[in-house]
């Protein structure tokens, strides 16, 4: 069954390395027969949060917020690609996430984390998991951590080592199960 995934990536640094991983995830979603939209915070520059999308009168939100709200409502799941800045998540990623709330509800999320070092961004991932639960898109149990992000993938987003392909397949098997299950459940109705 084809599902619709949104990939959220929130590093806006000029020298960012995580975009390679975001591209790899986008390609993987497409290869598995699903639809993928990469929301790159560097391309879709949101201002530092002033008003959330829902605080605007209907039809008056800036076009970029209306576009993202529509995209999120049509999504079956979110894949959040997060680096680790001082053991937390990148500020542009948090800013991107915080503009919305209800649009995420009743959909699963999955965390793909990375860092320059050997721990693959898992400390940031643990904080991200709490935020995603509060946003109504609880994360699946598995993480996809990628250490040594500088050498793990080519600039086009192709893995330099076979390990990544193997753990990615299992991660996506799990995400697809949750996304499909919650799609059926949403179609049957939500509590609010
Ligand atoms: C402000 C800042 C803080 C960082 N803190 C950590 C950290 O706590 N742990 C870690 O493993 N790497 C840390 N790094 C290194 C990042 O893992 C590495 O630069 C990575 O490429 C950042 O993702 P990006 O290139 O997509 O922005 C930090 C990098 C920056 C810029």
Image (cartoon, grey):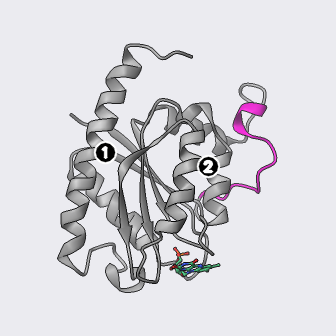
Specify the quadrant of the image occupied by residue 28.
Answer: bottom left
Q: CA distance from mark 1 to mark 2?
A: 20 Å
Q: Is residue 105 above or below residue 38?
A: above
Q: Which residues are magenta?
A: 44-55
Category of crowding for the residue at label 2, using alpha-carbon neighbours closer than 10 angstroms: few (below 14), some (14–19), many (at least 20): some
* Residue highlighted by disc 2: 97
Residue drawn 57% across the image and 57% down it? 127
134, 36: nearer the viewer:
134
Which image quadrant shows ligand 1?
Answer: bottom right
Residue drawn 36% across the image and 39% down it? 4
In the structure shown, which secondary structural element does the residue marked by tag 2 occupy?
helix
Residue drawn 59% across the image and 71% down it? 87
Residue drawn 26% across the image and 51% down it? 172
Specify whether residue 46 is painted magenta.
Answer: yes
Which SS type dominates the magenta stretch? loop
Q: Quadrant of the C terminus?
A: top right
Specify the quadrant of the image occupied by residue 147.
Answer: bottom left
Q: Give the image location of residue 159, x and y in percent.
A: 26, 75
In the structure shown, which secondary structural element does the residue marked by tag 1 occupy?
helix
Residue 116 falls left or right of residue 161 = right
Specify whether residue 136 is painted magenta.
Answer: no
* Residue highlighted by disc 1: 175
Mark nearest the camera among 1 and 2 is: 1
């Amino acid at each position: 069954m084809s599902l619709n995934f949104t990939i959220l990536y929130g590093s806006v640094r000029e020298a960012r390395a995580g975009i390679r991983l975001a591209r790899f995830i986008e390609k993987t979603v497409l290869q598995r027969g699903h639809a993928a939209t990469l929301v790159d915070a560097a391309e879709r520059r949101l201002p530092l949060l002033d008003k959330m999308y829902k605080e605007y009168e209907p039809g008056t939100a800036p076009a970029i917020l209306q576009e993202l709200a529509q995209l999120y409502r049509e999504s079956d799941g979110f894949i959040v690609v997060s680096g680790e800045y001082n053991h937390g998540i990148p500020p542009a990623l948090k800013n991107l996430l915080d503009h919305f709330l209800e649009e995420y509800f009743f959909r699963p999320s999955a965390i793909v984390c990375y860092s320059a070092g050997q721990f693959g961004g898992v400390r940031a991932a643990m904080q991200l998991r709490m935020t995603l639960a509060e946003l109504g898109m609880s994360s699946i149990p598995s993480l996809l951590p990628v250490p040594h992000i500088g050498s793990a993938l080519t600039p086009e987003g192709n893995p330099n080592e076979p390990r990544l392909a193997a753990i990615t397949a299992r991660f996506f098997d799990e995400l697809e199960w949750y996304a499909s299950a919650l799609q059926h459940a949403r179609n049957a109705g939500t509590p609010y």
